[in-house]
Amino acid sequence: MAACLAPGTHPRPRRHLLDAAAGFPGTGSALATWLTTQCAQYDTLLSDQRDLLARIGITADTARGAAARPAENEADFATALGYARAHHAARGTLAAEIDTVQDGFKLGRWLRRQRQHARDDARRGAPPSAAAKALDAVDPWWCPPWSLAWQRTWQHIHQQVQADHQLDALHEFRSFAPIERAWLRRQVTRYNDLHPGQQSLLADIGLTDESAHARPVTPYAETALAHARAYTAAHGSLATPYCAVHDSFPLGPWLARQRLLAQHTKTPYAVHHALTTLDPWWNPPWPMRWQRAYHHARTTPITAGTSRWAATQRAAWHRLHPQQRSLLTDIGITPQNRDTAQRREATRSYPPSPGLAHARAWADTAGNLCVPKSTHHDGFPLGAWLIQQRRKAGQGRLSPATLHALNTIDPWWNPPWPYHWHRTYHQAREHHHTSRPASPALQHWTDTQRSLWDVLHPQQQHLLTTIGIHPE
């Protein structure tokens, strides 16, 4: 009969003795492996980790006397590796789902543990373990630096390509299912942001850098370009209002979508190249309403309205973008022929934005305002602040004083091309001025600019020539 316990008391839990010298018998395979690893790395652990291990009976002396990985665990690994080889032979990948079972063995969970061990080793700077090397021999991408979902989708499409599916980027990958088409289009859009290993895998299925940049021109886009050509021939520019309709085609909304797309895409579109050929300033870095007013002043006789607009530009000359000044000079508006009548000085004043001081300090050191979003300067979120200013400038809500100040600090702080391109350009510029050898990725970018020269904006071409990059 069990002994009676006093009211309010509980039986003391049984303690499981950890025998490190014998390889922790009585524990599961995964737990025994983890405990053995902690003993082997005991000297590199934090003091708090050692304290926690001491609570379960593992001290410095215990760790030094711990046996190597139990022989039965080695046998378990060899068995699991056999299941992994069988799965790879059947599926072509080890990017298995967590619930994958191979011949009754829970392969998905086992692979997840092996990936965790491999990533822990990488974080500590330890060399790859024998287990990781064995899995590398089965599948070099069993533990990729990108998501397993990406790897599984790639493998699925790879199998279809081997089954003679046509991978045609120019025709929107029509031979694939809608979900697969969407995935392939995403790879094309963000190709320059992909890991080099991902780019190599995409090249294996025929999606190379050249095909990724070969943006398709859809029948609808061809129709829109035809209307854009006709509109430019009639009006001399593409500075259309949003509501513009040309021969029943909504040209204004279509151009607005293209401008928005040009701000976010990282690779040039053939459509955007065609629009730049029609009007180099179809997507200017200043508000479109200014561009429309400029073309009105350029193409109509001088009236009271255009005269007032010209006087406003002369008065605000020091706040304009350098390219705006150049355009105004082309039609005879210069700061020297300013009207005698001056605008009444504003009676309200506002304190300058703190971001301007940080922007000046940053540009004094770096020479530009091409900063990542996460950039902080003396605790101030400079990168996020500059993104906000670019958004305001695109919406026409940025104050003239702030616009002038930023244009003075860096004329290309808000370029009309993708910002990713501008950041890479500044990396290439730094290598050019310091005569340092460029990395393979930067050299690849340079070669891409030469091959796609005609697609670039005229000012992009000019900037590239200043650092010795010319068309092929």
Image: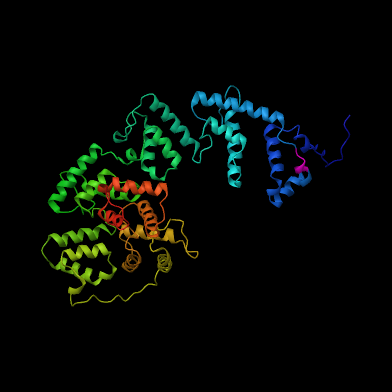
337 sits to left or right of 469: left
Magenta residues, as a range?
Answer: 62-66
Instruction: Indicate the colouring scheme.
Output: rainbow
Q: In the image as oriented, which residue stretches furthest toward the left? A: 301
- The answer to which quarter of the image holds residue 81 is top right
* Residue drawn at (14%, 46%) of the image: 230
Answer above or below: position of 2 versus 246. Answer: above
Rendering coords of residue 126 (x, y %) = 61, 44
* Front residue of 296 and 123: 123
| Relative image position of residue 188 (x, y in whole percent) | 36, 40
Task: From the top left corner, tell me how far across and down residue 141 is, in percent.
Answer: 50, 35
**Residue 189 in sight in this render:** yes
Q: Quadrant of residue 357?
A: bottom left
Q: Residue at x 35, y 40 (%)?
A: 209
Is residue 276 inside the magenta stretch?
no
64 falls in the magenta region? yes
Asked whether, in this view, residue 107 is left or right of residue 18, the answer is left
Which is the main secondary structure of the residues drawn in magenta?
A: helix
Counting from the top left corner in percent of width and height, residue 205 is at: 39, 32
In the rendered image, is residue 253 in sight?
A: no
Residue 308 or 125: which is nearer the viewer? 125
